[in-house]
Amino acid sequence: MAASPQYITFITEQLSRVGRVSSRRMFGCIGFYVDDVFCAIVNRDNECFLRTGPHNLNDFLDAGAPQFMASMPYYQVPEQVLEEADDMAVWTAKARSAAVAAQSIKPQTSKKPKTSKKPK
């Protein structure tokens, strides 16, 4: 079963209150970007998950929200938040900020210096 087109449209509308939304299929789900930052996932069961970090994780834990996958920092948006556009905008903005913060602390991969070939 795949996420329904109507649900994808609904989530896109909710997320778009924070910025420009784009999406693509990934992990067998739909991944959402807000202003080019990956911060939301919709699974096959029409459940929406947002990115978490130190500043918003407790919001999800306090609501008893399940985690998307044990190794991923995404938690399900509580139904009452999802249905209230203003609340969803706040939670989406926090999720986007968490994703931006996580990108800024990733270790930079070092590129190998280009070696110049010595003339023969």
Image: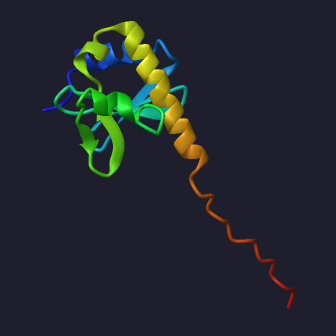
What residue appears at the point 45 percent right and 15 percent down from the top-left corner? Answer: 16
- Residue 61 appears in view: yes
Q: Which quadrant is home to the C terminus? A: bottom right
Q: Is residue 20 above or below residue 106?
A: above
Counting from the top left corner in percent of width and height, residue 86 is at: 41, 8
Q: Quadrant of residue 23?
A: top left
Looking at the image, which is closer to me, 71 or 62? 62
Q: Which quadrant is home to the N terminus? A: top left
What residue appears at the point 49 percent right and 29 percent down from the top-left corner? Answer: 96
| Left or right, 53 with reference to 78 | right
Q: Is residue 7 above or below residue 67?
A: above
Number of marks in picture: 0
Counting from the top left corner in percent of width and height, residue 76 is at: 27, 30
Looking at the image, which is closer to me, 120 or 79? 79
- Residue 28 appears in view: no
Q: Quadrant of residue 59?
A: top left
Q: In this figure, which colouring scheme has been used for the structure?
A: rainbow
Q: Single out the residue that lies furthest toward the left.
A: 1
Q: Quadrant of residue 10?
A: top left
Q: Single out the residue that lies furthest toward the bottom.
A: 120
| Left or right, 17 with reference to 105 | left
Q: Single out the residue that lies furthest toward the right.
A: 119
Counting from the top left corner in percent of width and height, residue 8 is at: 29, 20
What residue appears at the point 53 percent right and 31 percent down from the top-left corner? Answer: 97
Q: Is residue 39 above or below residue 18?
A: below
Looking at the image, which is closer to me, 113 or 84? 84
Counting from the top left corner in percent of width and height, residue 80 is at: 25, 13
What residue appears at the point 61 percent right and 62 percent down from the top-left corner? Answer: 109
